[in-house]
Image (cartoon, helix red, strand yellow):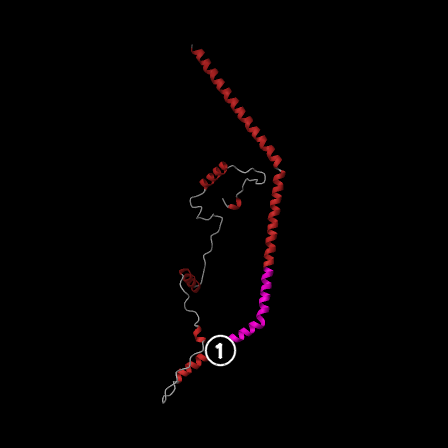
Amino acid sequence: MPVINESHDSLPYIDAEPSAQARAAAQQLIATELPPDHASTLHPAIPELPEPRFSPLIQQEIDRKAAGLPLTGGIDLSRYEAPEPPARSTDGEAPDLDEWRRALQRAYTASSHLSMRHENLALLEEYGKNAWLIGNSQLEDILRGLEKELAETKEAAEAVNKQRKLAQEASQGEMVSLEETWKRGVSAILDVELASEGLRLQILEQRRQLAQQQAR
């Protein structure tokens, strides 16, 4: 049976607390009805979780993190460091132009990287504060909205519980009267059954005695 169609006969605001023996008996009945795999199998009304669909790179990173392996690869930051100038040639030897050209290319790359970093830091210093404050303000608005929604939900739940309590307390006298009437009715039925059984035994005894008299 789906969970949404189940009902529970409980009046927590007027019902007395069950005794330890009654609670243990109820737990035993519940354990008897539960399947053996109830702790590991979801209820049929609960949908299964969707299978994750990660890209190969994301899955590779997840596997690396799960295995506890260090991060490898990525961007080589050494290419943005200022290169060392080539060694000076000895007297009489021509300088290695290819080596100087490669050093110049690396220096140009490092200079471009530093220039871009300087520009980004300048923009961050000029506009970053306002953007950060605006972002914080937006997050605060979202937080206030969520807190308001949470407070309204709590108030609605408290109102429902209050109405339920008032309804149960208002019906408590009627429930007690009906229970007492039911107990008296059950007791009367038992008395009638006992009297009927006694009468049946008397009839059987009289029939037995009559049969014995006729047999003489």
Q: Residues in magenta?
A: 116-142
Query: How many C-alpha atoms fall within 10 Å of the one at disc 1: few (<14), some, or many (≥20)?
Result: few
Image coordinates of residue 115 in percent, x first then y, are 51, 77
- Secondary structure mostly seen in magenta is helix
Amino acid of disc 1: Ser
Give the residue furthest to the top: 216
Q: Nearer the viewer, residue 11 or 96?
A: 96
Indicate the position of residue 193 as horizontal and vertical percent values.
52, 24
Of 27 and 33, the residue lying toward us: 27
Magenta residue check for 123? yes
Tell me if residue 67 comes above or below residue 95 in the rendering. above
Q: Residue at x 62, y 41 (%)?
A: 167
Location of residue 70 by image quarter: bottom left
In the image, is residue 213 part of the stretch drawn in magenta? no
Numbered disc total: 1
Query: Measuring 50% from the left and 22% from the top, which residue is drawn there?
Result: 197
Q: Is residue 31 above or below residue 187?
A: below
Label 1: state its secondary structure.
Answer: helix
Name the residue rendered at 45%, 15% in the picture: 208
Residue 134: x and y in percent read 60, 66
- Image quarter of the C terminus: top left
Q: Is residue 210 left or right of residue 186?
A: left
- In the figure, residue 149 lies in which quadrant? bottom right
> Residue 50: horizontal and vertical position, in percent?
47, 55
**Corner quadrant of residue 106:** bottom left
In this view of the protein, which residue sits in the foreground, 4 or 120?
Answer: 120
Residue under numbered circle 1: 112
